Amino acid sequence: MRPTVRHATADDAKRVAELVATAFSGLRAVAYLVPERRERQRVLTAAFLITVEHALEHGEVHVIDDGQAAAVWMPHTAPQPRDYELRMAEATGEWADRFRLLDELFAANRPEPPYHGLAFLAVRPDRQNQGLGTALLRYGHDRLAGAPAYLEASDPRNRDLYARHGYRQREPFALPDGALFWPMLRTA
């Protein structure tokens, strides 16, 4: 049975942010961003909610009908979220400098526009490897109608998934602890 993809609404924002936080919580990069495991889910949810809400206004958020997977897309032309730095500092607290550094690394490694950015592709851990991420990617690519897409993969397994969907790896970059990100571009 094929999963059904739908567009998220404002009512879905917190659940999508929680899903992304849950799906990403085991990543090495996330452990660097929020080293305190007991605080990780709360901090990540608050930080990711800023992007999810912004994408609902300026981009697109797609979810698998039962909420087990989500993709958050943003065109390169989207403005920065209102009061972004202040809101991120409030959301991330004592780890704000780590998130600020990650934002700087992302900005320094992005390609020249135009492109649509895939900010997040998240699947609940117990539902991974069941084609939900692939369904979301295909849906998003169909919506882009051949326009270029860009993302930063934070795990070799995810990097390989994106490569199977036409993304080409660019020069990787690392956080101070050595956690790698692989910028990836899917050309028109």
Image (cartoon, helix red, strand yellow):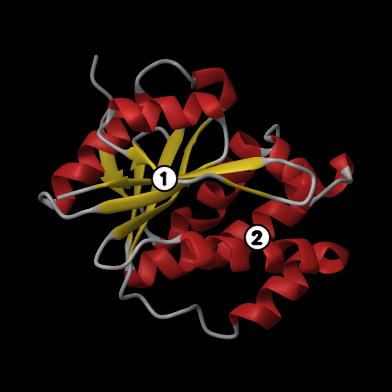
Q: Is residue 154 above or below residue 77?
A: above
- Between the C-alphas of marks 1 and 2, the distance is 17 Å
Q: Is residue 168 above or below residue 9?
A: above
The residue singled out by tag 2 in the image is 102
Amino acid type, mark 1? Arg
Q: Are marks 1 and 2 in contact (CB under 8 Å)?
A: no
Q: Is residue 10 above or below residue 175?
A: below
Q: Which residue sits at x=59%, y=35%?
A: 23
* Residue 57, picture quadrant: bottom left
Label 2, residues with CA under 10 Å away: few <14, some 14-19, many ≥20: some
Q: Which residue sits at x=63%, y=41%?
A: 180
Q: Secondary structure at mark 2?
A: helix
* Extreme residue in the left direction: 145
Amino acid type, mark 2? Leu
- Residue 170 bears which disc, if any? 1
Q: Residue 112: horizontal and vertical position, in percent?
A: 32, 67
Q: Secondary structure at mark 1?
A: loop
Q: Which residue sits at x=74%, y=41%?
A: 178
* Extreme residue in the front direction: 171
Side of 26 relative to 115 (left or right): right
Q: Residue 40: horizontal and vertical position, in percent?
A: 79, 46
Q: Residue 182: horizontal and vertical position, in percent?
A: 50, 42
Image depth: mark 1 or mark 2 in front: 1
Q: How many marks?
A: 2
Of residues 170 and 156, the one drawn nearer to the viewer in this rendering: 170
Side of 81 relative to 132 (left or right): right
Q: Which quadrant of the rendered structure holds the N terminus?
A: top left
Label 1, residues with CA under 10 Å away: few <14, some 14-19, many ≥20: some
Q: Which residue sits at x=76%, y=74%?
A: 90
